[in-house]
Image (spheres, grey):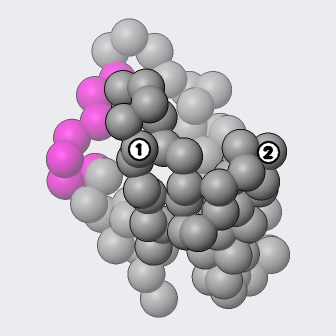
Amino acid sequence: MLHCICIPSKAGICDIVDGVGNCSYIPKLFADKYEKRYSSVPYDHDDMASLKVEITSAVEEYNEECVVSLNDVVEGVTSLKH
């Protein structure tokens, strides 16, 4: 979790994030935390390749008459949880 300390120099601009006060290092802090979080979830490369093919195929078949319901989304997300 990032902790931001806003010093009222400019509205909405933080001068210190997680103890980092150098403006050139703050973006790297966010990038490192993002990389750590999203690379920590294991996955099977074959499953991901298969999913990519399935999604690409479905997108190619999309037209203005297609409707995605909440149930479709829930079913899709649930199928990702093994």
Upstream in the sequence, badge 2 or badge 1? 1
What residue sits 43% from the left and 81% below the top? Answer: 81
User: Quick check: 11 left or right of 71?
Assistant: right
Which labelled disc corresponds to residue 24?
Answer: 2
Magenta span = 66-72
What residue sits 65% from the left and 68% below the top? 33
The answer to whether residue 80 is magenta is: no
Q: Is residue 47 visible?
A: no
Measured as percent of width and height from the top left, residue 61 is found at: 56, 26
Looking at the image, can residue 3 be seen? yes
Left or right: 9 with respect to 32? left
Q: What amino acid type is highlighted by mark number 1?
A: Ile
Give residue 26's position: percent from left, percent from top: 68, 52
Residue 7's tag is 1
Residue located at (34% from left, 73% from top): 78
Amino acid found under the numbered disc labelled 2: Ser
